[in-house]
Amino acid sequence: MGLSRPRRLLVLAVVAVALVACKRHNPGGDDTEIDAAYEPDACEGLGCFIVDCASKGLSPTTVSGTIYAPNGTLPLYGVNVYIPISDPGPLPAGAQCDKCSNGLLGGAYTQTATDEAGHFVLPDVPATTNVPLVFQVGKWRRQIMLSNVAACQDAILPTADTTLPKSKAEGDLPKIAIATGDADALECLVRKLGIADSEFSTDTGAGNVHMFQGDGANTFPAGWAGGAGPFPNATTLWNTVDKLDDYDISIFSCEGSQNAGTKSQAAMNAVKAYADLGGRVFLSHWHNIWIEGATNPVLPQAPAVWAGPGATGIATWNNSGTSFSTPPDRIDEVANPKGMSYATWMENVMGSPVGMRGVIPIQAGKQTVTGLDPAKAERWVYWDNAGVQYPQIFQFTTPNEAPAGARCGKVVFSDMHVSGDSRSSPGTPFPGQCSTMPLTPQEKALAFIFFDISSCVGPIQ
């Protein structure tokens, strides 16, 4: 006897539930019976298209290439490359506590990072159409779509696809504040690295690189792509943590002296608080005031923790007026956990002379630091003067007083000026005194650190 229509629908529903509960789809073959304790699919989404090439005696499915700075010529070390499981979404605005232990946004089916030649080989790439691919270091991020990935082959990407974005039109880039100084010209280095002129603006403009006047360049030329108007004073940047917190990276170019009158105790507190929140701070030469404190006895302001009483701070100082070009600087491959990679990268980009590993030819080297507390900071570069080693570049994470796993930000100090061929003066609109020559060895050395300071804090997970 036939079933009524309502009962037929009920039986079909029960059968359907039973099939879902008792079968798991095998993308490589037939459905497989399993017990009632349902196991989730072995694959999901793009993961279902990852082919076991080894079992077929074939090479793996890979994507490879070389990641470059926005200028398209300088290969970069330590850039993450991955296939996201879900949409990574927009990057959060402002300084963030970016720990490597947080993982990659959107998760990853497969991931790798570029080596000391900027090269990567991403394994186990899904062999299908429309595969998203992400390149990211800090808030430098480019996302592309691979239209078709062939199984068990290597897809080599062209440079046009693997260059970090020059502008927001090409992807994501960090929001950067630069305080100019007449003794250094770090804004010229940032421009040489390929960021588009349209991204250089004042803090009321639409660019991602905001210019502030210390005692260097203070305006743009007429018709500048990023906008017009004089640069606001640097004190409006560093006087409050609320202003600093708008930026992922803050760069302070050397002013030729500490200029303690423009750096109040409130500003000292704000810069430290910003770094502790996850901000990145790059300090050039006489901006040692932010770590050492003022040497002017009339204005004895100093940051908490970083300066410390006596020799208990992060560094010790002699504030020497020494300037040198010989002997050259050297990369510390022992105290710096990235030192060996740094030295190899400098060889690969021809920043070190052939056969002189770890050597950085230098112009306008300075010497204000005498030593570091190795429990608080890493020495990246040093100057060996007649057997005495003076730190030239060092880095520490923040809050420095917190356990390593609880730190969020980074601070880099450099006694090394950019070079002798770029300047920054109030009488010449930016970039009128910026050199158009290729990157010098010390500019390459600083470029490595510029992208590293953007990266997450702690070991890559």
Image (spheres, rainbow, N blue to C red):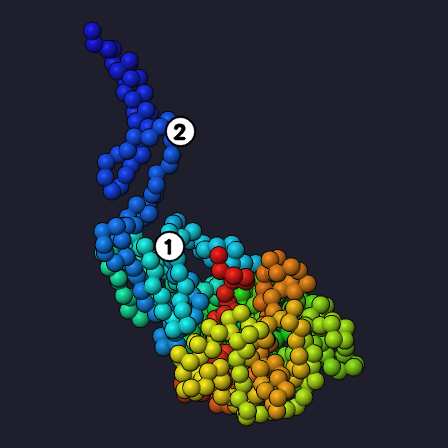
| Discs 1/2, front | 2
Which residue lies at the image location 65% right of the left edge and 68% below the top edge?
A: 375
Q: In the picture, which quadrant includes the N terminus?
A: top left
Furthest toward the right, the residue is 298
Q: Amino acid at mark 1?
A: Thr
Q: Is residue 309 visible?
A: yes
Query: Is 295 or 416 nearer to us in this picture?
Result: 416
Query: Is 58 or 120 nearer to us in this picture?
Result: 58
Which residue lies at the image location 31% right of the left edge and 71% below the top edge?
A: 159
Would you identify the image quadrant in which residue 279 lies? bottom right
Q: Secondary structure at mark 2?
A: loop
Which residue lies at the image location 57% right of the left edge and 88% below the top edge?
A: 365
Q: Residue under circle 2?
A: 37
Q: Earlier in the sequence, mark 1 or mark 2?
A: 2
Q: Secondary structure at mark 1?
A: strand
Q: Position of residue 293 (x, y in %)?
A: 71, 76
* Left or right: 163, with 424 as reference point: left
Q: Is residue 273 visible?
A: no
Q: Position of residue 141 (x, y in %)?
A: 42, 63
| Mark 1–mark 2 distance (CA, rounded to whole Å) | 29 Å
Q: Which mark is residue 110?
A: 1
Vertical order, 425 against 44 (above or below): below
Would you identify the image quadrant in which residue 410 lies? bottom right
Furthest toward the left, the residue is 1
Q: Position of residue 169 (x, y in %)?
A: 38, 65
Q: Residues within 10 Å of mark 2 (few under 14, many from 20)?
A: few
* Left or right: 253, with 321 as reference point: left
Q: Amino acid at mark 2?
A: Ala
